[in-house]
Amino acid sequence: MRYSLSINRHHHDKTVGNKKHYRDGFKTQELTIEELAKAVKQGFAWSCATYDRSMRSKANYQQAQLIGLDIDNGLTLDDALNHPFVQQYGQLIYTSASHQKSKEDTQACDRFRIVFSASQPINDLDTYEQLVRAVMGHFPSADDSCKDASRYWAGNSQAEIFILDGDPLPASLIDQAKEQAKLEWEAREKRRQETLARVKKQNLDELKTLALKLK
């Protein structure tokens, strides 16, 4: 199985020669999970999504089929490898550059990424982010920023790699994500309309007040 994702070869582990490559240079690649693991070991940065003009941003989001979670604490590698959800749906686990290293005010611990795959590419950004949230619900210790559809991860030339043989996430999970995205869009639209109505009423009241003053 090949997946469309983005690889940035301007990164090596956490080193980036030019700051513009935090956004630019995320080129679309069609890779198997094994090929993605190889790119990680080469130190290349990667993102689950593909982007218009290879420029990583939500505005340029095209599609994504893989889902990545970043685990920085609260779950060991053994916990993850034996987690029922990972055993059923996991595709890849690899350790990050900060694995078993002290980090700011935290002690050394297992730090790694878990990769899952949807049963189909997801073109709608809101649906994708809802699907990521649903997967994150199984892993309370996952970094909350994983839900960002334009998230990227640094490679790690020293990574421990675990290729898994999980199934794609069920289509029903995507259907639920679509429904949740629709509900949240409707809620946002309702708030927007209510805000516009308040602004319109306020402007009318101000015009009436001004007209009275000019009499």
Image (tube, rainbow, N blue to C red):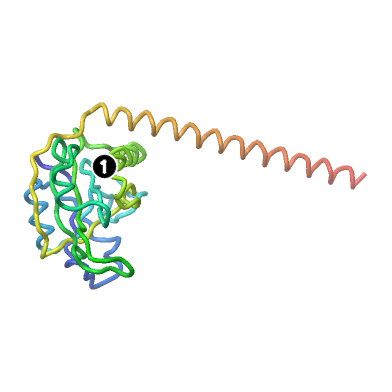
**Relative vertical location of residue 164 with respect to residue 13 in this rendering, above or below:** above
Q: Residue at x 29, y 56 (%)?
A: 55
Q: Secondary structure at mark 1?
A: strand
Q: Quadrant of the N terminus?
A: top left
Q: Is residue 77 left or right of residue 69?
A: left
Q: Residue at x 33, y 32 (%)?
A: 177
Q: Could you say where residue 207 lies in the image, as x and y percent from the top left?
A: 79, 43
Q: Could you say where residue 162 lies in the image, as x and y percent from the top left?
A: 9, 50
Q: Is residue 116 left or right of residue 201?
A: left
Total labels drawn: 1
**Foreground: 215 or 160?**
160
Q: Could you say where residue 119 lies in the image, as x and y percent from the top left?
A: 19, 33
Q: Residue at x 27, y 53 (%)?
A: 74
Q: Quadrant of residue 46?
A: bottom left
**Foreground: 20 or 140?**
140
Q: In the displayed image of the protein, which residue is found farthest to the right? A: 215
Q: Which class describes the residues within 10 Å of circle 1: few (<14), some (14-19), or many (20+)?
A: many
Q: Quadrant of residue 194?
A: top right
Q: Quadrant of the C terminus?
A: top right
**Relative vertical location of residue 14 with respect to residue 207 in this rendering, above or below:** below
Q: Could you say where residue 110 lies in the image, as x and y percent from the top left?
A: 19, 58
**Foreground: 153 or 134?**
134
User: Type of residue at label 1?
Assistant: Gln
Residue that badge 1 annotates: 63
Q: Quadrant of residue 154?
A: bottom left
Q: Residue at x 30, y 55 (%)?
A: 56
